[in-house]
Image (cartoon, rainbow, N blue to C red):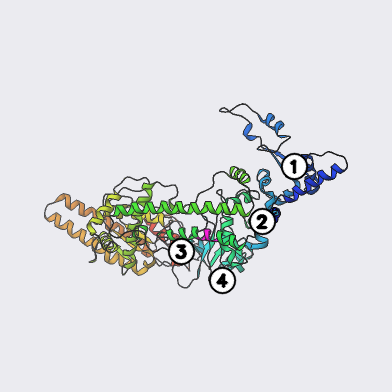
Amino acid sequence: MKRVNVKAILADADLRRKLMVSTIQATQAREGIETTAEQADRAYYVVTEGEMSAFFNLEPYRGGKLTEGDKRHEMFVRSLDALGRVRFDVPRRDFATIDGAPLAYKQLSLVFALFRENPTLGEHFASVQGGMNSTESERFIRYRWEVMSGMRKWMSFSKGGAFSRFYADLDLVMDWTDSGSDYKDVVKEKYGSASRFVKSEAYYGKPGITWTEMTSKGLNARRLPEGVIFNCKGPCAFPRAEEDADYLLAVLNSSLAQMLMNCLTSRSYGSTYVARLPVPDASRDIKSSLKSMAIEIFNAKERWDIGNEVAGTFQLPWALRRDLLCDEELFGKKLDRLATIEQGEQTHIRSIYAKLDDEVYRIYGITDSARKLIEGVLGERPPEVLWPQMEGKTAEQKRMEHVWRLLSYAVKRVLEADDDGIVPFNAVNGEPRLVERVRHELAELFPDRDASQVEVEIVNELNQTVKGYRRCASLDAWLDNAFFEYHCGLYKNRPIFWHIASAQGTARFAFGALIHYHRFDRNRLAKLRATYLRDAIEEFRREASLADKAGATADRLEWQAKLEEAQALDVKLQAIQEGRHEGAEGGDRDLRILTPWKTSEERPNGWDPDLDDGVKVNIEPLQKAGVLRVAKVV
């Protein structure tokens, strides 16, 4: 006797319709009425679904210069009797699913049953919240590296950000001292109410899932760690069951979830829309499988990001990763190896993502034919990218980026280890030049290699022509003309190492120094002038005098020009130190620190920066005075 698989029969999502259609035919037959399967099927929809709406996708048949003539009328007539690529029948009742959303009949016709058969994210799985409607960003929000722990409490701040699934570093912080009392007072005074801006406060600091509200690339969810304030541009879902977090992360990032979201919205993924996403309550094993995939992709991206100097998890630049590279390898070989590793990891996470997609289609009960139609509607989706900062860049650009990141880290080590945070390019005040200190750091970083040979290998890379990177024939040239501009870009125009120089651009400068912004207070500026710059001025004066006595006119003129350039720099630094101002407040000749939210009495008298006010405010006097190597920083 053949055994019947009852479970398989009951699992058929179309079972109800099949039973009803056969019943209608049998009932009509008993009355002597012959009924076709198509007629019974239509009767089923009339009884169970209510009125139907038919839509016709005739756009592909309008014709054009490179195709046949307009065939829309022909395709319309052909489609009257049959569903297919042109005609889409949607039950009227299913439009309640997309009430208030853009009309998406084609998408809805493919997936409408999923909205009926599954609970929504907001009902069953998570509390979906819109975040803070922030204002006064200039006053209360900073990049993480701008501020230091002190009197103020700075909390990580999530504000949507660039497209990134599963993982993204949080580089912003918000002043939330005394639970944001200052912020609340300001918005209440200016706008009449703090509650209009401070929304979902009970969820601040809790772990969850966040995504970018406005994006043309689609829904991209990633983990939200503990201790974060979230903005309305980065709504969040807070799972009711902690063990569901990574399962939901997997589902939200799937291609099918994107299709479902397209039925609800076009490019605005606000909390209200995402809360309506249908999510199947899968078995524990399926949840565990999807959870593992999401974790694996997250871990791969997070591991790679520890080589990113501005990431919160930064440890070492990629070229120094001993878990990836061999110490004894030639530098060029290291770069080759890094390219191979990155490509391998990227291929790996794309493979996992494809498996994740397969599993999500399966748990929603999507057939292969329906999946093909869905993916045709979706089109090509953004792939998983291991190194998002270099997305779309060539292999040569990525290779050069590794070189520049290594040198940037060497400079960072020099500045952070220096006693006063002032490192001169010139040999003054009894201190070695910047380039010599960087060479020393490179020797420390490559202990198993000859330091001179390592520098030769690095310079060979710097001397290549690569789009977007200044070609440099020596380490000196890179430090003089490339580092500060690159540092400003890497630190998103909020640099913490400032290159003060007597000439801007790429012209040779008589005097230059890198200073650590976090330590460049009133006393450090005074020391820069009175010790480092004064030493250089005395040297230039002495050399000019010796050249004059020797009758070396050309040398005397060169040293005299350096002397005058350094003296001109000293005059500018003195003006900054004193906070001189002429003309209109905030004009080009106003060299005070003009913190916008402080009264004139609260602002410093001369150079006395408050780090909590941020780089943008504090660097402005130096920009106006023209003492930075790069004229425009912020």
- Give the residue at the far left of this rendering: 550
- Per the image, label 1 sits on a secondary structure element best described as strand
Left or right of residue 82: residue 347: left
What is the three-letter code of the residue carrying label 4? Ser
- Give the residue at the far front of this rendering: 1
Query: Where is mark 2, residue-wise?
Result: 276
Magenta range: 291-295
- Per the image, label 4 sits on a secondary structure element best described as loop
Q: Residue at x 44, y 47 (%)?
A: 392
CA separation, marks 2 and 1? 23 Å
Name the spot of residue 422 as percent of width and height, x first. Answer: 31, 65
What is the three-letter code of the residue carrying label 2? Arg
Q: Is residue 328 magenta?
A: no
Numbered badge on residue 53 = 1
> In which quadrant of the rendered image does the C terminus lie?
bottom left
Does the CB distance between marks 2 and 1 fall below 8 Å?
no
Return the disc, 3 or 1, that comes first in the chain's sequence: 1
Name the spot of residue 334 as percent of width and height, x first. Answer: 32, 55
Camera sees residue 134: no
CA separation, marks 3 and 1? 53 Å
Numbered badge on residue 144 = 3
Query: Where is mark 4, residue-wise?
Result: 179
Left or right of residue 448: residue 291: right
Magenta span: chief secondary structure? helix
Return the disc, 2 or 3, that comes first in the chain's sequence: 3
